[in-house]
Amino acid sequence: MTEPATLRRTALHRVNEALGARFTGFGGWEMPVRYGSIIEEHRAVRTAAGIFDLSHMGELRVTGAGAADGLAAALVNDVRRLAVGRAHYSMMCAPDGGIIDDLIVYRLAEESYLVVPNASNREVVAGELRTRLAAFDCTLEDETLATSLLAVQGPEAAAIVGSLTDAALDQLRYYAATEASVAGMALLLARTGYTGEDGFELFCAWQDGPPLWEALSSAGRDRGLQPCGLGARDTLRLEAGMPLYGSELDRDTDPFEAGLGW
């Protein structure tokens, strides 16, 4: 994977730097691959909780009367069967059946969907979606650069997030999402954990990323919460047997240089 000369940085870059993150290029972004030991971050998620900066992921909002029919035609799943507030794992395939990308689709309202592709494929997916949706009465907006995405994963995730919100987490099912206020910030709160543990994804305004991270870190300080990078994200998903598109690491990266040699 050849990265552009200038990598984008998330709103949390300075926070990650202050935490001693080791960075790598992925999908055009400079992302934390680890903060300390990948294996310790992995174990923290399995035994307590980890917090991730996933702001490199894509956020594509599709709205309009034809959004459901358009996405049903564009992706392998029939999104028309999704209830409002639910999500499912899907794929976008090429005409020959090959996979362009795997992604998550959230139905936010009757005529509003959020499609979350992988960072490395965001522009390809967005371009292909625009082509496939052209014949339908709907619009696509790429909100990636206006969105920060944080995740809290692990057995303590519900207690940590729950201490900062009045959202009824006990009623938020796996692969569901709801508009909520967390630490006083309006956001989309999803429960689509990707590590094999319970967990939440928090889609907030770009500028709210750092204060939200600080609030979650403070709430999780006595519950074993640790910052985790993309290295642990990969190992957790692989251990759980969950689909992983390629690798979060640059394919030209020396694994020992990146810190994967443990």
Image (cartoon, rainbow, N blue to C red):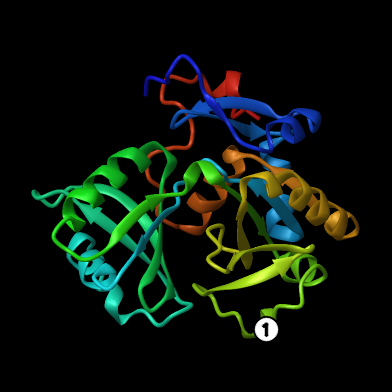
- Residue at 35% x, 74% y: name it: 111
Which residue in the rendered view is the most extreme toward the right? 222
Position of 80 with respect to 191 (left or right) is left
Would you place residue 232 above or below residue 112 in this image?
above
Q: Quadrant of residue 36?
A: top right
Q: Position of residue 165 (x, y in %)?
A: 76, 72
Q: Is residue 224 visible?
A: no
> How many numbered marks does the figure carry?
1
Nearest the viewer among 196 and 56 is: 56
Nearest the viewer among 100 and 71 is: 71
Q: Amino acid at mark 1?
A: Asp
Nearest the viewer among 26 and 206 is: 206
- Residue at 32% x, 62% y: name it: 90
Name the secondary structure under disc 1: helix
Position of 136 with respect to 229 (left or right) is left
- Residue at 42% x, 19% y: name it: 4
**Residue position marked by numbered label 1 in the rendering:** 170
* Label 1 Cα neighbours within 10 Å, binned few <14 / some 14-19 / many ≥20: few
Q: Position of residue 234 (x, y in %)?
A: 52, 44
Q: Quadrant of residue 112?
A: bottom left
Q: Position of residue 262 (x, y in %)?
A: 66, 30
Would you place residue 215 above or below residue 18 in this image?
below
Q: Is residue 59 visible?
A: yes
Position of 105 with respect to 48 (left or right) is left
Position of 224 with respect to 102 (left or right) is right
- Residue at 69% x, 61% y: name it: 154
Would you place residue 28 above or below residue 237 in this image?
above
Q: Quadrant of residue 35?
A: top right
Q: Position of residue 149 (x, y in %)?
A: 59, 50
State the quadrant of the N terminus: top left
